[in-house]
Amino acid sequence: MSHALTGYLFPNDVHILWSLMIVMYPYITGLVAGAFIVSSLYHVFGRTELRPVARLSMSASLAFLLVATLPLLFHLGHPERSLNIVITPHFTSAMAAFGLIYTLYLTLLVLEIWLVYRKDIILTASRSRGLKRWIFATMALGVYDISEEALRVDRRVITVLAALGIPAACILHGYVGFMFGSVKANYWWSTPLMPVIFLFSAVMSGMAMVIILYLILMRFANRPIDPDCVQSLARWLWLFVVMTVTMEMLEIVTLAYERNEEWVVIAPLLNTKLAFSFVVVQVVFGSLIPILLLGIVVLMQPFLTSPLRNTITFIASLILLIQVFAMRWNVVIGGQIFSKSLSGFRESYHPQLLEKEGILSAVLIFIVPFVFLALFNKFLPLYGDAPETKAATTEEG
Amino acid sequence: MEHTKHLWRAFLILLVLGVAGIFVRHFLIPESFGEQGFYRYTSLGEFKEKPVIHGAVGSCTSCHQEIADTKTAGKHASVSCEVCHAPESVHAAGGQKIADMPTNPSHTLCATCHQFLEARPKEFPQVDVTQHLIDLGVMAKGEAIPDGACIVCHQPHTL
């Protein structure tokens, strides 16, 4: 029986308007920001052991950035109107700032990737013929200067761009958390901690994604895995998991301890509607297990072989990708299941397989970045170790 | 500076793109936008041109006084005729009936407001439609809801 919406209730008490697509949106922008932070650890903070993933993480960030707006387009429909918000942005609206932040970040990222790959681009251009040569020559902007001097200038610019990119990536994702944290009518969202939690879990998911991509890429390319690199990523990841989970729990503990009026809905929300996706998936499976697994990798390093540590890190990363997805789900959907006037709950939300904002759309959107990465890898290697590139752009630190 | 030619070219391209963006934006902003506020001022005129669809509350009364009176005496007093029927413009214009007014005898009409939902205020009369009909022996469990199921017992105007 379909329940139409008119007739003596508040629409936001009945419909889940922010659907699966609005779960996907912060998930994907989180991966963008997180992957970028990994590349900055190398480019700005000189974590040289992360060099094997420096290019990969940057390209992954771009690949996810290119699809970041797709969930919003699916959700809103009318793609032809999507640019209105960019053309006439109203600066009292946080959403309107998105167009600017996105453009700024995209420009930074493309410039940085271009500089990192410039030498490869030029070498490919001079090695190939015909159309390919023409394309790569265009990408090199017609300048074939790979003298030591030029590359040194490039490296300096890369460091500046990567440094600028950190606040840009943080704003890009912090603003998504802000979108939720600033909805003051919603007790489950409205906390100043929200942007921070979003940001930390973004870094977490981005790192996990880079680890997974790196391990899979090396397997397929038949290359040795750099154990120091994975070990270092595991250590960083552990740090971020611990901090993220601490803040996520802190928020709940504060709510539970204060017992303000919102606890009337938050408590039943957590132990009925979100019992599975929050308590089971996000907290027990998604947080405790990876903390233990990564703890083992980090603390017992001398006692474990590196293939074993890589495998454990891989599993922990996969679980963390699920954890972050569950966290986005619990925030976005959880915040819409209860009545804003505290009069109860609506039935849970079950996305359909084939609807416009359904499961299939979400899966397709999520696959596209990997296709981009595979294509990218066809033309420019995601790992930089051809002899001539080794000495090149990714050398500082 | 030597060896920075490529950077200058990249910078030039960004500059051109930026200027082109500002230029294009100028043409994309709709006319009259921002004249009176953060919206397209001429849209007001366009809305004014649109035909009126719904009559005001009481627009049916002039021709259906009797029904209006019985309805006002009952529980549905606060429910507008047009909610259950259709907008006035499909049916009457200039003091004349111009076409038949649709009537929806289906239970879906009533369920719009009376189907039990957790989110509805508790004091609002609501039933689980299927269960209500089963409880009253109108149908058996698993059967389809018959046409006009509710108005057999509840007269919408005279409740």
Image (cartoon, rainbow, N blue to C red):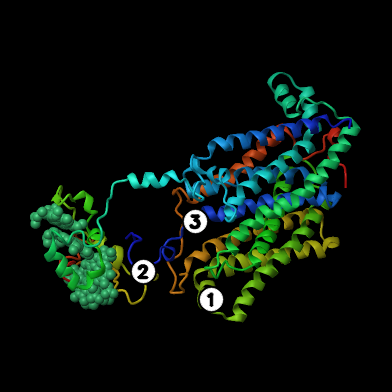
Q: Earlier in the sequence, mark 3 or mark 1?
A: 3
- For the residue labelled by badge 2, is the local secondary structure a helix, a strand or a loop? loop
Label drawn at residue A19: 3
For label 3, the crowd category at 10 Å Cα-Cα, with few meaning under 14, some 14 to 19 and many 20 or more, is: many
**Which residue was labeled with disc 2?**
B117
Residue type at mark 2? Leu
B118 over B11 or under it: above or below = below
Q: Is residue A340 visible?
A: yes
For label 1, the crowd category at 10 Å Cα-Cα, with few meaning under 14, some 14 to 19 and many 20 or more, is: some
**Quadrant of the rendered image containing residue B84:** bottom left
**Quadrant of the rendered image containing residue A332:** bottom right
Residue type at mark 1? Glu
The reply to whether discs 2 and 3 touch (Cβ–Cβ < 8 Å) is no
Locate the N terminus of chain A and report the quarter of the image it occupies: bottom left
Label drawn at residue A262: 1
Residue A34, given in percent of the width and then of the height, sits at 70, 53
Question: Which residue occupies 50% across, 57% down?
Answer: A18
- For the residue labelled by badge 3, is the local secondary structure a helix, a strand or a loop? loop
The reply to whether discs 3 and 1 touch (Cβ–Cβ < 8 Å) is no
Point out the frontmost of discs 1 and 2: 1
- The chain carrying label 1 is A
Is circle 2 on the same chain as circle 3? no
Question: Which residue occupies 79% across, 32% down?
Answer: B8
- Foreground of the two, B149 or A166: A166
Point out the frontmost of discs 3 and 1: 1
Q: CA distance from mark 3 to mark 1?
A: 23 Å
**Quadrant of the rendered image containing residue A311:** bottom right
Would you say A131 lies left or right of B36 here? right
Would you say A187 lies left or right of A43 here? left
- Foreground of the two, B114 or A131: B114
